[in-house]
Image (cartoon, rainbow, N blue to C red):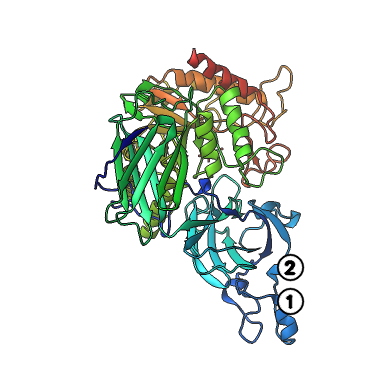
């Protein structure tokens, strides 16, 4: 064992600076802590007029509708016969979480609004320990009460949050109430109009996590461009200042000891042993990490790699890599998805990308996916683009909206910056250029760099079309491009707009020279199993049309010298309420290369073969 003791009172890598940080405990790598899993059976109650929030009329105290009180309604009614209650969370319908309420019952399929969820649980709080309730995500806004006490509110349907509940738990029958509201307005991120299903509800795991009084709240380990492993650790608790900290990476025979600085922080930089195996799609090597302080043990599995840009190339561990990718929504395979992306469901999708599509890259659109997906990418060796849902038009001029988006960005980066697979942070998708938007997006890029200086930053941009010359020219004229490491554009020539698929290869691209360009989207719809009539030209939504579209768009892509990768739209058909062509879409965006249950369309092989050729 190599022993080393370094205590460098440097700035803790990412939590300092001007970025907007989440409130409350971070609990980095919370999914690796042994918690009490509160998934499983909950009760739920719809509340379309939101009178459960306010109380409205009812019993003497005006509580007849107030869902979050710590009341056994049945007992209260017997104890006070005239009392009026118009809810009873203990006897409400049951649902298994995580999932969206859309699949709790047929009549819930199109419900959008407020739904109350309740979970009763026993806890065994140990004196001297701290307890946290951690939510993987609640879509969209959540208000949380424990035993009648308000814990807080969180907005944003795709990032984690936690509340400290030390001293608030009882041994038996705790009553956890969550008001989950799926309604968004134009001050929200994403805005009300998107092109995917709003899966309202508690869509990721909920757990009760116990830690010693002083514990490791945040730890960030990575290989920095100087070739060293850099670790930033933040303790929280009364004994954090000067606390002894031990870091072990058994796979590298490393054991390091030090003491935290007066603010409870530690920064280490070490030259890794020469045996370090770098993480890559070919060798997704992860190292077990243990960080101890007092009784607390923080665990994670971390890969070490570098990512950079040189001219128009993306470099992984110093070597050029072409991003052979595909976009993905957080929606599992199956005829009736509910958004419960378990580790197995995530692996099922990513295995198709890696093994069948010959891919090495996924764009996780259009919002941060759950821990399970990013962990599966780490394990399977897929490079990841991770995005916040700054999508189309939001209220860019509103400073509160900017604060909200910045918080979301921090929540995403702080959750996932230990994941080697994540190589690109994206600050948004198809946001129309104007002054307030440009300032908004530039701020997000600056934040991403402060939070994490060594990953690449991108955004999916819009292009302008110029038909004044002999061939159509697609032009990238967006001032945000100057701020990004990787330029990315979505292209749909041959699907939307005037072009026929066979005209697509001649389209020219006017993009900044010497910088990597990714087609963050390209796509065409096809209903699985719908084929062109014999001898007739394929019409839209046949598999043949989609396959022809792919052949021609790939031919166009081959003409772009700076093309560094693709993430076509999209691996799997996904539910979207704006897609209602009867008998063809029926609520599904059909641009998947596979259907809802994995049915492969003809275009799948077109792309898979193209990627295979690039590997040779
Ligand atoms: C886009 C959007 C994506 C849509 C897709 C489509 O440009 O970024 O969210 O689903 O087009 O299918 O139109």
**Against 487, is 91 above or below?**
below
Q: Residue at x 49, y 35 (%)?
A: 363
The residue that mark 1 highlights is: 74
The residue that mark 2 highlights is: 91
Residue nearest the observer in this picture, 33 or 202: 33
Residue nearest the observer in this picture, 325 or 465: 325
Residue ranking furthest to the top: 616
**Image-based side of 241 in relation to 169, left or right:** left
Describe the element under mark 2 as helix, strand or loop: helix
**Image-based side of 413 in relation to 355, left or right:** left
Task: Give the class, few, some or many, for how many residues have Cα within 10 Å of label 2's Cα (few <14, many ≥20).
Answer: few
Using the rendered view, name the quadrant where residue 596 is placed.
Answer: top right
Position in image of residue 236 (x %, y %): 38, 57
- In the rendered image, is residue 390 in sight? no
Position in image of residue 221 (x %, y %): 38, 39
Q: Residue at x 63, y 38 (%)?
A: 345
Residue nearest the observer in this picture, 132 or 482: 132
Residue nearest the observer in this picture, 533 or 469: 533
**Against 558, is 122 above or below?**
below
Position in image of residue 486 (x %, y %): 37, 32
């Amino acid at each position: 064992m190599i022993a080393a003791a370094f205590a460098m009172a440097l700035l803790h890598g990412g939590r300092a600076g001007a970025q907007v940080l989440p409130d409350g405990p971070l609990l980095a790598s919370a999914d690796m802590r042994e918690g009490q899993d509160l998934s499983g059976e909950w009760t739920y109650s719809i509340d379309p007029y939101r009178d459960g929030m306010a109380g409205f009329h009812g019993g003497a105290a005006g509580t007849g509708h107030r869902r979050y009180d710590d009341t056994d309604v049945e007992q209260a009614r017997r104890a006070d016969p005239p009392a009026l209650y118009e809810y009873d969370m203990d006897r409400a319908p049951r649902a298994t979480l995580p999932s969206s309420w859309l699949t709790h019952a047929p009549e819930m399929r199109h419900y959008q609004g407020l739904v109350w969820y309740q979970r009763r649980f026993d806890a065994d709080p140990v004196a001297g320990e701290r307890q946290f309730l951690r939510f993987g995500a609640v879509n969209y806004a959540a208000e949380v009460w424990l035993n009648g006490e308000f814990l807080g509110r969180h907005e944003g349907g795709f990032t984690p949050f936690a509340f400290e509940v030390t001293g608030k738990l009882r041994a038996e029958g705790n009553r956890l109430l969550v008001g989950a509201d799926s309604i968004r307005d134009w001050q929200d991120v994403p805005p009300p109009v998107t092109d995917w299903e709003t899966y309202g509800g508690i869509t990721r795991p909920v757990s009760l996590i116990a830690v010693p009084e002083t514990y490791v709240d945040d730890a960030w380990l990575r290989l920095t461009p100087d070739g060293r492993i850099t670790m930033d650790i933040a303790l929280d608790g009364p004994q954090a200042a000067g606390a002894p900290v031990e870091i072990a990476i058994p796979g590298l025979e490393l054991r390091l000891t030090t003491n935290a600085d007066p603010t409870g922080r530690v920064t280490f930089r070490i030259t890794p042993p020469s045996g370090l195996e770098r993480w890559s799609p070919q060798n997704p090597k992860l190292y077990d990490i243990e960080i101890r302080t007092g009784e607390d043990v923080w665990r994670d599995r971390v890969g070490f790699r570098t990512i950079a840009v040189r001219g128009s190339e993306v470099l992984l561990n110093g070597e050029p890599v072409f991003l052979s990718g595909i976009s993905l929504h957080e929606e599992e395979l199956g005829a009736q998805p509910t958004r419960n992306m378990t580790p197995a469901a995530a692996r099922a999708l990513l295995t198709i990308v890696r093994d069948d599509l010959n891919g090495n890259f996924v764009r996780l659109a259009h919002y941060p996916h759950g821990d399970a997906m990013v962990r599966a990418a780490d394990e399977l060796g897929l490079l990841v683009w991770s995005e916040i849902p700054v999508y189309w038009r939001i209220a860019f001029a509103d400073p509160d909206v900017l604060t909200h988006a910045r918080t979301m960005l921090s929540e995403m980066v702080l959750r996932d910056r230990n994941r080697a697979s994540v190589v690109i942070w994206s600050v948004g998708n198809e946001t129309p250029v104007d002054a307030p938007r440009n300032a908004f997006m530039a701020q997000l890029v600056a934040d991403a760099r402060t939070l994490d200086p060594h990953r690449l930053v991108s955004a999916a941009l819009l292009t302008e079309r110029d038909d004044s010359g002999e061939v159509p020219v697609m032009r990238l004229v967006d001032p945000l491009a100057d701020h990004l490491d990787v330029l990315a554009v979505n292209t749909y020539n041959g699907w939307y707009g005037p072009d026929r698929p066979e005209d697509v290869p001649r389209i020219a691209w006017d993009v900044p020279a010497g910088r990597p360009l990714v087609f963050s989207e390209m796509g065409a719809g096809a209903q699985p199993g719908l084929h062109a009539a014999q001898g007739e030209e394929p019409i839209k939504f046949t598999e043949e049309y989609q396959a022809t579209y792919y052949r021609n768009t790939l031919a166009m892509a081959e003409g772009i010298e700076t093309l560094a990768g693709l993430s076509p739209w999209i691996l799997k058909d996904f539910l979207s309420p704006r897609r209602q062509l009867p008998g063809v879409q029926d609520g599904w965006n059909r641009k998947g290369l596979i259907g809802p249950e994995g049915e492969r369309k003809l275009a799948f092989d077109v792309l898979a073969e193209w990627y295979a050729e690039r590997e040779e």
